[in-house]
Image (tube, grey):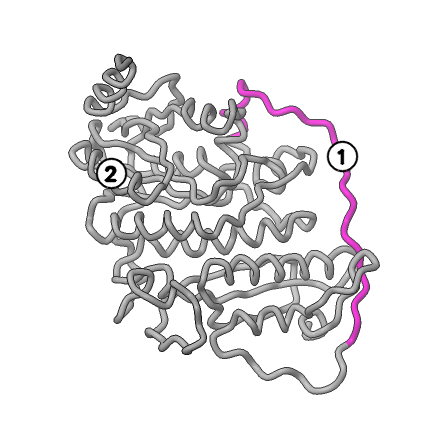
Amino acid sequence: MTELLNASYILDGVPMPLSPAKMLRECTVEPPLEPDGDPSTVADEHLDQEPRGFEFTEKDIESYARAVEGFKRSLPLRFSGPYTAGKVAQALLDAIWMNGHFRMGDLTLKADWKWKDSPIGLPAAFYDSVEAACGYIDSLGVKISQYGLTSGTPSVTFKATTVAEEDAPEDEDSLLRELPYRTANPRISRRRKVGASFAPEASDWIIYIPFDSCDYRLGGSSLAEAVGASPSAPPEIGDADYFIDCYEVVRELVEDGIVKAGITVGEGGLLPALRAMCSAGTGAEICIADICKAYGDELPVRVLFSEVPGVILQIADIDYDYVDAELILQDVVYFPLGHPVPGKAYVELTEHTDLPHILESLMSSMEGED
């Protein structure tokens, strides 16, 4: 498999500037030595799209949720780049819930690929996956601690952990080398600081925060594969600056004990994540109308199943104003979805979400101004 890593690539007739190994070495804390000898050349082409008619409908949302639940999806070769960027984001978000004291700039990622060098399309998909990983990781200001490639059915996994504080080189111009993006003595535990299931408190708020500004699309999603939908465009994950802003404020809320429960929105999308939080016997009543409006009357199916990186938080009603102020201060967009429902371990989609009284009053006073 070293050939896939070190080879020079010609994709769709166009020579690529860097090998996957060179891209990875630039993102690695302690990169391995370059191999001796001239690299081989891999010539490949990207897979063509196979159009198939499929129309998602709002009336089938429940059946879509059942189709995605427990579905063992494969890596979408046509969208290996966006899929890989999503896996990077998911690994970082999975770490946000853990015990310890760290910021995103303290984290490194362990990366592992499984791949094959044939048939046609697999080498091109591997190149796209590595290119997307390295580009996104570099933009986020984190590093790869180590990486590996073994033979097998195509897949990619990332795991986040902390490293000791490094002294920034004199020529390093990176804000991520300075506080508050890094801590003097970072530490992380494999134990969660907050639970992953809803706490049975009906007055609490359920808040959704997307960590990217991209559109909600279903291409390459678990739902699209589960129901055999046409491989349309995937979400264009890549707004690293916004991801960093979201990460810092949410991590502080977790460390300060404001978050009572939380979960990563990744593979499967928003609705499967909400359903997963019902595992302890408490469900939720949620409304996604504000999300749909914010994205230009987006279709509910896309909002509920698009794999845009994000988080779901449960916070106490008394903390809502504080959380609102912190998120607004960092220009982080969030959506109050609704409330937990003790004793009903399912998610009910409603048509409205009651705003906290203070926000309701503010909105009324604004409407009354000349």
Residue 29 vertical placement versus 268 (above, below): below
- Left or right of 369: which side holds 222? right
For the record, the magenta segment spans: 40-64
Image spot of residue 370 (x, y percent) = 28, 13
Query: Quarter of the image holding residue 40?
Result: bottom right
Pick whichever, 353 or 169, lies toward us.
Answer: 169
Q: Is residue 118 magenta?
A: no
Residue 191 vertical placement versus 352 (above, below): below
Pick whichever, 160 or 348, lies toward us.
Answer: 160
Disc number for residue 51: 1
Q: Disc 2 designates what residue?
A: 325
- Residue at left 68%, top 27%? 54
Pick whichever, 162 or 116, lies toward us.
Answer: 162
Residue type (three-letter) at the residue carrying disc 2: Ala
Q: Label 2's element?
A: helix
- Residue at left 35%, top 38%? 277
Disc number for residue 291: none
Pick out the residue farthest to the right.
13
Residue 261 vertical placement versus 182 (above, below): above
